[in-house]
């Protein structure tokens, strides 16, 4: 039991020293001078021991005694501002993901153009097919209209026969299909324009990313002064 006393004394001594060092460190940190940085209504930047109450809801930056930023406090936002901020964050995330997609998918501008042309060829084929179908529907509609002229109410002669039900139904069906197909054709033309604009933007962005990457490589490889 006597042999254990020196050991316990050593342990207790070590704990007391560590505790004192921790307390001193905490006291030193707590007493460290902090400076606040904020911007007023005129956009002028200010520094001080505290932030005036009228600017307390705005963005603030906390600097340590060496003038280094150690904390950033975001300004409080209204629901509308918070929604706009979230939308910007979402768009920024989408843009970064698309940048990564461009760089990792395409080796060159020519490859982007090839993919674009394939997509446009598909749309153009669909447009051509739709135009052909619309042409046949238009021809069919004109034939039905000529037949309808023989019957009332298009034929105003006394005793003109009533239009047969099957003819009336066929005219309604053809006219309805024509409207549907013309709407679909307009959608395809809009899609064609959208694809052209999208790939033009992708090509422009791809060039920017490649130029930026090349500049970083050149900077990294340039001799240090």
Image (tube, grey):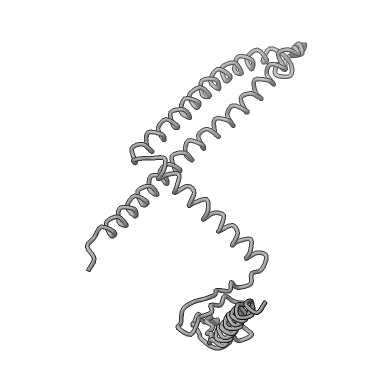
Q: Is residue 30 visible?
A: no
Say whether residue 22 is left or right of residue 192: right
Residue 86 vertical placement versus 44 (above, below):
above
Residue 82 vertical placement versus 152 (above, below):
below
Q: Position of residue 5 (x, y in %)?
A: 64, 80
Q: Position of residue 68 (x, y in %)?
A: 46, 78
Say whether residue 25 is left or right of residue 124: right
Q: Position of residue 217 (x, y in %)?
A: 30, 55
Residue 2 quadrant: bottom right
Of residues 197 and 60, the one nearer the viewer is 60
Give the position of the C terminus as an image quadrant. bottom left
Q: Residue at x 51, y 56 (%)?
A: 92
Of residues 174 and 189, the one nearer the viewer is 189
Residue 50 quadrant: bottom right
Q: Residue at x 33, y 37 (%)?
A: 110
Q: Position of residue 91 (x, y in %)?
A: 54, 54
Of residues 166 and 90, the one nearer the viewer is 90
Say whether residue 109 is left or right of residue 68: left
How many circles with numbers are drawn on the protein? 0
Residue 114 vertical placement versus 58 (above, below):
above
Q: Residue at x 58, y 86 (%)?
A: 27
Say whether residue 215 is left or right of residue 70: left
């Amino acid at each position: 039991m006597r042999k254990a006393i020196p050991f316990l004394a050593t342990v207790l001594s070590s704990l007391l020293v560590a505790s004192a060092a921790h307390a001193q460190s905490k006291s030193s940190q707590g007493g460290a001078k902090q400076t606040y940085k904020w911007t007023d209504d005129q956009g002028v930047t200010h520094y001080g021991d505290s932030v005036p109450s009228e600017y307390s809801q705005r963005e603030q930056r906390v600097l340590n005694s060496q003038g280094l930023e150690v904390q950033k406090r975001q300004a409080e936002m209204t629901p509308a501002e918070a929604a706009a901020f979230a939308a910007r964050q979402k768009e920024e995330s989408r843009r970064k993901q698309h940048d990564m997609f461009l760089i990792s998918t395409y080796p060159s501008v020519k490859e982007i153009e090839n993919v674009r042309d394939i997509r446009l060829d598909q749309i153009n084929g669909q447009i051509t097919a739709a135009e052909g179908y619309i042409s046949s529907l238009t021809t069919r509609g004109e034939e039905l209209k000529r037949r309808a002229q023989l019957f009332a109410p298009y034929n105003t002669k006394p005793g003109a026969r009533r239009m047969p039900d099957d003819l009336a139904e066929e005219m309604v069906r053809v006219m309805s299909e024509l409207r549907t197909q013309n709407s679909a054709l307009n959608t395809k033309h809009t899609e064609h324009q959208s694809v052209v604009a999208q790939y033009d933007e992708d090509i422009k962005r791809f060039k920017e990313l490649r130029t930026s990457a090349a500049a970083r490589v050149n900077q990294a490889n340039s001799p240090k002064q």
